Image: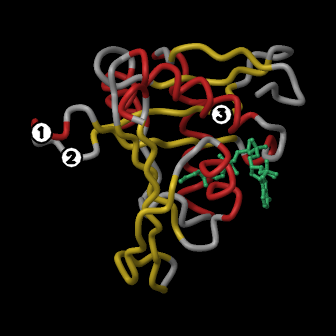
Amino acid sequence: MTPTHPVILRPVEPRDNAGLRTIYNWAVENTTATLDTEERSADAQDEWIAKHDGLPYPAIVAEDADGGQIVGYASLSSFNPKAGYNTTAEVSVYVHCDWHGLRIGSALLSSLLMEADRRGFVCLIALITNGNEPSLRLHRNYGFMETGVLPKVARKFGGWVEVTILHRVLGDAA
Ligand SMILES: CC(C)(COP(=O)(O)OP(=O)(O)OC[C@H]1O[C@@H](n2cnc3c(N)ncnc32)[C@H](O)[C@@H]1OP(=O)(O)O)[C@@H](O)C(=O)NCCC(=O)NCCS
């Protein structure tokens, strides 16, 4: 998938801290896409980068090819720390709010799926909150199937949040 604005996709680096926090903290303050309710600090972002800049979990950033701004990122994280789940990971994709709808999320997810396959992950899980139609469309476009719905599983902004579980099996196992 080619974005409608040129971006460079590359692995996350420590220097991406501020760019990642701008994107994530906008989602914390304005959406239920994340169920974090407190903004992520610089230290917490450093820890997140350290967990995603090597094995087993990758993060890919999208950088504006014209100006170098971080405009989005996609990552894999632990779905469940128990060893039996080691071939499963949870997917996250975030695009800067000024850059939505430019196929950057699609490019990131496509690249992340290839990276996940290369690393031997077999099952990817996406947890999408009610009303997040762009994210549902994005994941369905890349073969994620709806597996179930968790009603009243979380609260944010004074209301209940429902979560739809989607999964995608990779490689030969698919
Ligand atoms: C979800 C998100 C990553 C999508 O990234 P994006 O770069 O804007 O999406 P793309 O341009 O690649 O489009 C992907 C699909 O979403 C659809 N879409 C994008 N913006 C939309 C909108 N405002 N309303 C409805 N659908 C929308 C596109 O039409 C496309 O679907 P289609 O091919 O069936 O038409 C982005 O909206 C985002 O970062 N949202 C906030 C954080 C978030 O929700 N992350 C996901 C957590 S599960």
**Secondary structure beneath label 2:** loop
Say which of marks 3 and 1 sits in front. 1
| Left or right: where 144 falls relative to 56 | right
Q: Is residue 111 above or below residue 129?
A: above
Q: Which mark is residue 84?
A: 1
Q: Looking at this view, is 160 or 119 the one in front?
A: 119
Q: Residue at x 57, y 61 (%)?
A: 29
Q: Name the quadrant containing residue 67.
A: top right
Query: Which residue is located at x 60 percent, y 48 percent?
Result: 139
Q: Position of residue 28 (x, y in %)?
A: 53, 57
User: Quadrant where the C terminus lies?
Assistant: top left
Does the beta carbon at disc 3 come under 8 Å from ligand 1?
Answer: yes
Q: What residue sits 53% from the left and 49% below the top?
A: 144
Q: As shown in the figure, which amino acid type bears the numbered disc 3? A: Gly
Asked if the residue at tag 1 contacts the one at tag 2, i.e. Cβ–Cβ closer than 8 Å, the answer is: no
Q: Nearer the viewer, residue 26 or 94?
A: 94
Which residue is tagged 2?
80
Q: Earlier in the sequence, mark 2 or mark 3?
A: 3
Q: Quadrant of residue 163?
A: bottom left
The residue where tag 3 is placed is: 72
Distance from disc 3 to disc 1, alpha carbons, whole Å, reads: 31 Å
